Image (cartoon, rainbow, N blue to C red):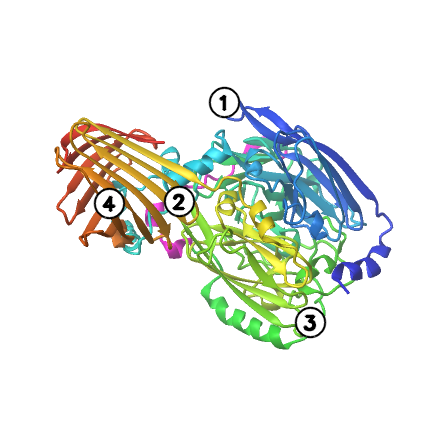
């Protein structure tokens, strides 16, 4: 018998206030002006963010959306346990809402907590289709004032164009963010920076950055700065339900009035944790208690992880008290180990012991709880049992403040999160271990699991009734917030049987995390990186229950992004020659065209097909046509390998149809933010080298010397 049936039989009859809570909204366009530039956004009920939805455990939530757009849309209920056909992923389990059509979602509320809802169509989150959800216990008394704080990121540029730009160059937005890493600054930061740069270059890792996109603004409840009035400051504190509804941003959140006390993560109550600064990853939620005071308005500041901006909420009325500035990270002094902000290494033994125990022991009875959510009169484990597959009756609790006065200065991982009850999975089940390595190429902006995008490998198969353990290893230099639909999972940490339950987990650069969940559902559920640009370029899978999956190849094609192929153009116009390069690429393949000419009597044309085995190696084949100084033109067939060598040197190893071999090497060195040096050499003794001055990420002035075309000055265009 499923957990939901057990829950309905034993728990819901106790609720006397169950009702059907109904909403109806239009999804439409909306003109906005956040930065001084008017643009068209998307909205729900003419609001960005959308209205907050509220319901109680035992209620039925019914929400109708009318699509007034000229494009399809959808709504996903992030973190909420519900029937699969209500999950809202287009084609996978819910049909998209067509232009002019309406769709009604209806499902029972099985658990309390802070959650959110958003579009799962293309990049519509970035354009404004997102809102918050507050689910309460049926008989809960509001002991403290509660406020929702929904963080998001904003860019005036069209979201599809943002993705196209990311495809063009791995540092496309570095100029706008002023995060270009150059050798003058490496040297200025001394020996550690030099060591970091040489080590990363030797291992073929490019310069570090913490965020892909240069956002124009960061918002809290739709504004750069907003305010919350405190109704009764004599209570001494209020509760903030914080949600990171961003497209791709992480935030370090700090409160000017003193430490925040975390009481819930991803809607799941945890042992209270006092923190001074909290990192909240994309798509996560945290409930915190914050102190308030008469005559004071304390700033809650959310600073983007790359230090390029922040949003503010002033809590209270009276004199404003600013939160501390968060200094921008020094990327020159960071290495892979610095960025691996996960659990400590000394947790490994606890994890191993935990895994051994979980295979052998029966499911323990939930432990008595030591603290409860400040606004929930009860705390029950029924809603957690997609992870624990056990149902307990509600246990009345009273609010309790943390026993320890120790304050965590900066919480960046899950080491301190501890569930209030045991979350150990049933020990009498078969265990399935799944290894998923997070892979990708920042240079080509392709993201994947185990080296394969979702187009190449769409599913992970599991069976109902087993325990599933994901071993997640991040081989990239970017953070990845992974979200599993339809389930809560345990994030295994040093708290053993009380490891916390979550629905979204961050995997730091070069980091590793283990999650576990009970396979107690049916059919198909999405598992993906919640950085929308990473998800759209391949980092997602469908978790399918073998005996009930409805997934087909057609569905797999339907849930893929509409746009598969992206183009890159580079035009180099010099006083002595021109060079035009055009590339059309998808996840694995690319077609490359290059024309060099002096527009008098010399030219070379290359037309190639490339297959990218991984981020470092690709194989190619194609044609080359050339004429040099009125020599007879000739065509040859060529084939070979492109290999990225240590120190980020691109090498081409090729042979032609005459059996002649050629090796070509080239590289680009960023000397300062604006000045760069590039060179090219091959074993035919052809050389090109020069300096470039970047006016923007699309335009540069260049001075070059070429053995075929001579010396000259010109312009380089990227478009």
Say few, some or many: other residues with alpha carbon within 10 Å of mark 2 (under 14 / 14 to 19 / 20 or more).
Answer: some
Give the mark, 3 or 4, whose residue is nearer the N terminus.
Answer: 3
Say few, some or many: other residues with alpha carbon within 10 Å of mark 1 (under 14 / 14 to 19 / 20 or more).
Answer: few
Residue occupying the point 75% across, 61% down: 3
Q: Is residue 167 left or right of residue 700?
A: right
CB atoms of marks 2 and 3 within 8 Å: no
For numbered disc 3, what is the local secondary structure?
A: loop
State the CA–CA distance, disc 2 to disc 3: 44 Å
Magenta residue check for 318: yes
CB atoms of marks 2 and 4 within 8 Å: no
Q: Name the residue that disc number 2 marks.
A: 329
Residue 446 location (% of width, % of height): 43, 47
State the CA–CA distance, disc 4 to disc 1: 38 Å
Give the mark, 1 or 3, whose residue is nearer the N terminus.
Answer: 1
CB atoms of marks 1 and 2 within 8 Å: no
CB atoms of marks 3 and 4 within 8 Å: no
Q: Name the residue that disc number 1 marks.
A: 37
Give the mark, 4 or 1, whose residue is nearer the N terminus.
Answer: 1
Residue range (magenta): 316-339
Residue 313 location (% of width, % of height): 58, 35
State the CA–CA distance, disc 1 to disc 2: 29 Å
Query: Which dot marks residue 667?
Result: 4
Q: Outermost residue, bottom direction? A: 360
Q: Is residue 107 above or below residue 491?
A: above
Give the mark, 1 or 2, whose residue is nearer the N terminus.
Answer: 1
For numbered disc 2, what is the local secondary structure?
A: loop
Say few, some or many: other residues with alpha carbon within 10 Å of mark 4 (under 14 / 14 to 19 / 20 or more).
Answer: some
State the CA–CA distance, disc 2 to disc 4: 27 Å
Q: Name the residue that disc number 3 marks.
A: 363
């Amino acid at each position: 018998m499923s957990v939901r049936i057990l829950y309905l039989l034993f728990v819901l009859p106790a609720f006397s206030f169950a009702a059907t809570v109904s909403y109806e909204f239009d999804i439409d366009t909306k003109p906005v002006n956040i930065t001084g530039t008017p643009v068209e956004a998307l909205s729900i009920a003419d609001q960005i963010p959308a209205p907050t939805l509220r319901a109680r455990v035992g209620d039925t939530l019914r929400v109708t959306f009318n699509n007034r757009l000229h494009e399809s849309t959808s709504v996903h209920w992030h973190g909420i346990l519900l029937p699969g056909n209500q999950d809202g992923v287009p084609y996978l389990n819910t049909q998209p809402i067509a232009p002019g059509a309406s769709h009604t979602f209806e499902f029972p509320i099985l658990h309390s907590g802070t959650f959110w809802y958003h579009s799962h169509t293309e990049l519509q989150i970035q354009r404004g289709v997102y809102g918050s959800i507050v689910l309460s216990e049926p008989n809960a008394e509001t002991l403290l004032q509660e406020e929702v704080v929904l963080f998001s990121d904003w860019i005036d540029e069209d979201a599809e164009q943002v993705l196209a730009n990311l495809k063009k160059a791995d540092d496309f937005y570095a100029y706008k963010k002023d995060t270009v890493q150059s050798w003058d600054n490496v040297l200025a930061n001394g020996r550690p920076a030099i060591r970091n740069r040489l080590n990363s270059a030797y291992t073929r890792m490019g310069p570090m950055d913490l965020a892909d996109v240069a956002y124009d603004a960061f918002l809290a409840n739709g504004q750069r700065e907003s305010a919350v009035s405190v109704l009764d400051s004599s209570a001494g504190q209020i509760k903030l339900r914080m949600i990171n509804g961003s497209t791709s941003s992480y935030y370090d959140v700090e409160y000017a009035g003193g430490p925040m006390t975390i009481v819930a993560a991803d809607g799941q109550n945890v042992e209270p944790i006092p923190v001074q600064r909290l990192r909240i990853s994309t798509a996560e939620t945290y409930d915190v208690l914050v102190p308030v005071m008469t005559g004071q308005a304390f700033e809650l500041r959310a600073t983007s992880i790359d230090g390029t901006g922040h949003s503010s909420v002033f809590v209270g009325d009276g004199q404003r008290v600013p939160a501390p500035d968060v200094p921008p990270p020094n990327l020159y002094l960071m290495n892979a180990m610095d960025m691996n902000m996960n659990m400590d290494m000394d947790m490994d033994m606890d994890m191993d012991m935990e895994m051994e125990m979980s295979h052998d022991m029966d499911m323990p009875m939930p432990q008595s709880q030591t603290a409860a959510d400040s606004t929930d009169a009860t705390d029950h484990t029924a809603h957690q049992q997609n992870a624990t597959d056990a149902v307990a009756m509600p246990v009345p609790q009273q609010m309790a403040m943390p026993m320890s006065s120790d304050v965590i200065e900066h919480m960046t991982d899950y080491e301190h999160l501890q569930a209030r009850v045991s979350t150990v999975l049933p020990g009498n089940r078969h265990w399935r271990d799944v290894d998923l390595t997070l892979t990708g190429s920042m240079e080509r902006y392709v993201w994947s699991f185990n080296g394969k995008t979702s187009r190449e490998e769409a599913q992970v198969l599991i069976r109902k009734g087993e325990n599933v353990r994901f071993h997640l290893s991040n081989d990239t230099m970017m953070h990845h917030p992974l979200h599993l639909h339809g389930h809560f999972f345990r994030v295994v940490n040093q708290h053993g049987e009380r490891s916390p339950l979550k629905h979204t987990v961050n995997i730091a650069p070069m980091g590793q995390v283990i999650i576990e969940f009970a396979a107690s559902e049916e059919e198909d559920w999405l598992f993906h990186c919640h950085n929308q640009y990473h998800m759209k370029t391949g980092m997602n899978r469908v978790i399918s229950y073998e005996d009930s999956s409805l997934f087909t190849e057609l569905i797999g094609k339907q849930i893929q992004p509409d746009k598969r192929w992206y183009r890159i153009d580079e035009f180099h116009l010099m006083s002595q020659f021109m060079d035009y390069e055009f590339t059309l690429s998808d996840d694995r393949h690319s077609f490359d065209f290059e024309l060099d000419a002096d527009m008098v009597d010399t030219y070379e044309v290359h037309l190639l097909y490339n297959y990218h085995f991984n981020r470092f190696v690709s194989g190619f084949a194609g044609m080359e046509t050339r004429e040099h100084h009125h020599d007879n033109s000739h065509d040859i067939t060529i084939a070979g390998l492109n290999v990225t060598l240590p120190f980020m040197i691109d090498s081409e190893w090729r042979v032609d149809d005459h059996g002649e071999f050629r090796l070509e090497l080239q590289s680009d060195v960023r000397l300062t933010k604006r000045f760069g040096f590039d060179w090219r050499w091959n074993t035919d003794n052809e050389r090109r080298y020069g300096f470039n001055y970047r006016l923007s990420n699309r335009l540069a002035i260049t001075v070059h010397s070429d053995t075929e075309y001579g010396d000259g000055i010109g312009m380089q265009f990227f478009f």
